[in-house]
Image (cartoon, rainbow, N blue to C red):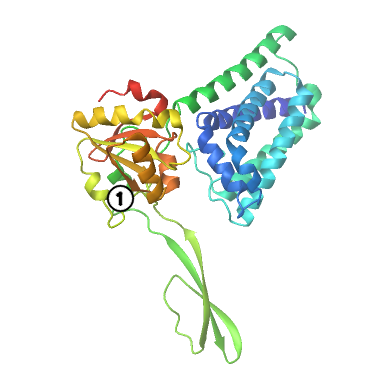
Amino acid sequence: MKYIVQISRVFTGILFIISGFIKLNDPLGFSYKLEEYFGADVLNLEFLIPYALGISVIVVVFEVVLGVFLLIGYKPKFTVWSLLLMIVFFTFLTFYSAYFDKVKDCGCFGDALKLTPWESFTKDLVLLVLILILFAGVKYIKPLFSKLPTTIIALFSFILSLWFGYHVLMHLPAIDFRAYKIGSNFQEGMSTPEDAAKAVSEYTWTFNVNGEEQEFVTNGSYPKVDGEYVGVETKVIDEGYVPPIQDFSIESDDEDLTAQFLEVDKLLIVAMYSIPKGELEGVNKLKTFTDNAKSKGYTVIGLTSSGPQDKAQIKQDHNLNFEFYLCDEKVIKTIVRSNPGIVILNKGTVMNKAHWNDIEDIEL
C-alpha cells in the first residue's frame, strides 16, 4: 500500500501542476469555458457568469498549489481532502457535459490539449481512483523536508502562482497554444488539405412500413424503402479533419471582406470582442497608436461583435480614424486575450500581437 500511495502521489501531483499551470497561463480562456458551463444550456447558473474570471483564477491557482502541496507533503489531510472535493466536482461536471453533450471541450488543459467530454470524464475517473488511494493511505504521505522549508516552498508556490496569473492577465499568455499565435497564417489555418480525412456520419432513417415504424441505418444515402418517411437522425462517427481556424471573417454590412484584408501587406487589427466592455484605459490609447500606424503605411481596421450604434459611438467619443468590421465574438476572444487587443498581419501571417497594456512596446 505504501508504494502504491507514493506512485499515486507523484502522478496526481504532477498532473495537477501541469493541468493547473496550462490554465493559469491563460485564465481568461478558462473563464470563457466556465461561462459555458454556467450558461443556461449546461448548469443554468447564469448568476455566476460575472464572477467567472475570479473563480477561474482561484480554481487554477488552487489546482497548482495542491499539486505542489501533495508532492512536498505539506498538510497531507487538508491537501487530500481538497483534492478529493475538487475531483468529485469536476468528475460530475465532465460527466454532465459528456452525457448531455453540452460542452465539446472541457478546457482541462486549456488550448494545449483538446479532450472530448468523454475523454475528460475518463481522465477524471482515473484521478478520482488515485485520489481515493491517497485518501485511504494519507498516513504514508510524509513531508519531504523539515517543517520550515516545507512551509516556505508551499507559501512560495502560492505567491508565484498568484503573480503569474496576474501577469498574464495584464499582458498576454506567456505561451500561446492557439491557432492565432505569432507566426501562424490565417489562410493556411482555414484551409483543408486535399488528402485530409473526411467526416463520417451515420444516418438512422425512420419509415412507417405497413403501419409499423422501422429504422434503417445508412452512411448517408437515402434508403430504398416501400413506406412513408417519418424522420432521420444523424450521428457523427468521426469528425475527420477540422481546420484549426473556423468562423473567422471580416464583414461589413454589405459584404465579406475576409479574403481582401488577408492579402494586405501591413494590416493592423484592433480587436474588441465587445465595445461596451472594452477597458477604457486601453481604448484611450488607440487614437495615438492607430494614427501613428497609418502614418507608417499600415491599413488599420477594427474587429468587433458589437452593433452599428456601438461602433459609431466609440469612433465619435475617441475620434478614431478607422472602421470597425464584424466578426464572431468567440473568435475575437480566441485571437487575442485583451479587450482591446492589437494584432499585426502581413498577408494573413501573424507578425505580432499585444495586450493594450503593451501598446507602447509595439514596433511599427
On the image, which quarter does residue 206 sit in?
A: bottom right
Residue 316 in sight from this viewpoint: yes
Q: Amino acid at mark 1?
A: Ser
Q: Which of the image's four quarters has the N terminus?
A: top right
The x, y position of residue 267, in whole percent, is 25, 37
The x, y position of residue 297, in whole percent, is 18, 32
**Residue at point 54%, 29% (across, down):** 24
The x, y position of residue 361, in whole percent, is 34, 21
Single out the residue that lies furthest toward the bottom: 210
**Residue at point 74%, 35% (across, down):** 84
Whether residue 257 sits left or right of residue 307 in the image: it is left
The x, y position of residue 116, in whole percent, is 54, 48
Q: Nearer the viewer, residue 293 or 222?
A: 293
Whether residue 118 sits left or right of residue 298 in the image: it is right
Q: Is residue 211 above or below residue 7?
A: below
Counting the numbered discs, the total is 1
Q: Residues within 10 Å of mark 1 (few under 14, many from 20)?
A: few
Q: Is residue 292 above or below residue 153?
A: below
Q: Which of the image's four quarters has the C terminus?
A: top left
User: Under tag 1, what secondary structure?
Assistant: loop
**Residue at point 61%, 17% (across, down):** 159
Residue, disc 1: 191
Q: Nearer the viewer, residue 97 or 15?
A: 97
Residue 179 in sight from this viewpoint: no
Whether residue 311 sits left or right of residue 349 in the image: it is right
Whether residue 138 sits left or right of residue 276 in the image: it is right
Q: Is residue 80 above or below residue 104?
A: above
